[in-house]
Image: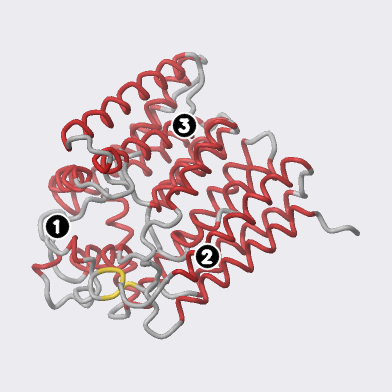
Amino acid sequence: MRTSPALVAGAATICLVAAASALAWRHDSPLVPRDGGTAEQGSAWPFLVVLAAAFCAYLAGLLLVRRTPAPVRAALAVAVVVQLVPLAAPLLLSTDAWTYWGYGWIASEGGGNPYVDPPSAFPESPAAPYLGAAWRDTTTVYGPVFTGLSEPVAEAAGSSSDAVAWLFKGIAAAAMLGACVAAAAVATRKALAVAFVGWNPVLAIHAAGGGHNDALVGGLAALAVALALRRRHELAGVVWVVAVLVKWVPLVFLALSWLAARARSRSVGWRGALGAGVVLCGLATWLYGVDWLRAAGPLAASAARETSYALPSRLEQLGVPHGAALSLAAAGFAVGLAWLAREATRGRPRLGLAACLVLVTTPYLAVWYLAWAVPLAGADDERAARLVALALTAYLLPQTIPL
């Protein structure tokens, strides 16, 4: 039987992701974070070249799947391997997983409250030497669902930085595969949706490789979309609330999805959302007091900082004053969101474009935020959203790679 050319491209993506992951095992690899951040010694150019080649193979695979659809099960098998291969690497390119560990340890073992006490107040924590330097004096910015999840992970890992890294990496990998299945469940061209989400090598490197909780946000958002389209509205409402209580960003997507549901005279799932909100917020208050509501404070402070890849920073590099650059980005977000809200009132939530809008306009842009945009663009089954998501993936691919 003739092998599908698309599956050959998928196999090439697997091999290149494996090669990129293997580079992290070199002695003193600059890909492995240490000393509170990514090590700068050495050269990561080989990693960049291999990852870029994997992205090209991925694009070729998408074109081939679009022309001649591969069997869905075969496409899913490729996705599973692509997303799981980086589990064989050490933690890649970010200390975030160890920072989650630090916050989880404070609540589970340290006798503190991560919404009140910064990690620097617990020098005895096994996470202390590994925490990201920028977060040592900052209380957690994450929602109580993720903080609650971090507690048993910290307990299970004990004092092992490797164990905690692989636990968070495993959660992120599982979330990306869940997002892949959810996108395929609602897409017209299922094999293409599987390949679009599951074959993406940049997502694999930062999910199963970096263990970022943004994969969990993307997976939950895609699941909520799939449940709503299958008329499981109340359960979709529950999932949306869980996603929001991991990280606040899905509030934008939830609002647009509810506007679209009302425009179509469909249930918005408010009973499920309300019930989940009452239960989860009650548990959060029991565990962390009302202080968990303060997470928005450090989150806003974090968002106010700029990364070099963000639009405001790029505008400043062109000579635009700092305040004007931020104002332009904020105006772009407001105008874009108003247009998307109008589209939603016509029954089109366009969540893929909404996620891309957040990425384009945020002052604090990180490559792992693609885990929101790519699954939602895949689930939307909209060509414009997918093209923007691919462009953002190509643009952000080099970010965090120490060159």
**Left or right placement of residue 226 versus residue 77 in this view:** left
The image's mark for residue 353 is 3
**Left or right placement of residue 61 versus residue 268 in this view:** right
Dot 1 lies on which element? loop
Q: Closer to us: mark 3 or mark 1? A: 3
Whole-percent x and y of residue 54? 59, 60
Whole-percent x and y of residue 21? 51, 72
Q: Quadrant of the C terminus?
A: bottom left
Q: Which residue is mark 1?
A: 138
Three-letter code for the amino acid on which mark 3 is drawn: Leu
The image's mark for residue 49 is 2
Q: CA distance from mark 3 to mark 2?
A: 29 Å
Q: Residue furthest front?
A: 319
Vertical relation: 112 (above or below) 266: below
Q: Between disc 3 and disc 1, whose residue precedes?
A: 1
Q: CA distance from mark 2 to mark 1?
A: 35 Å
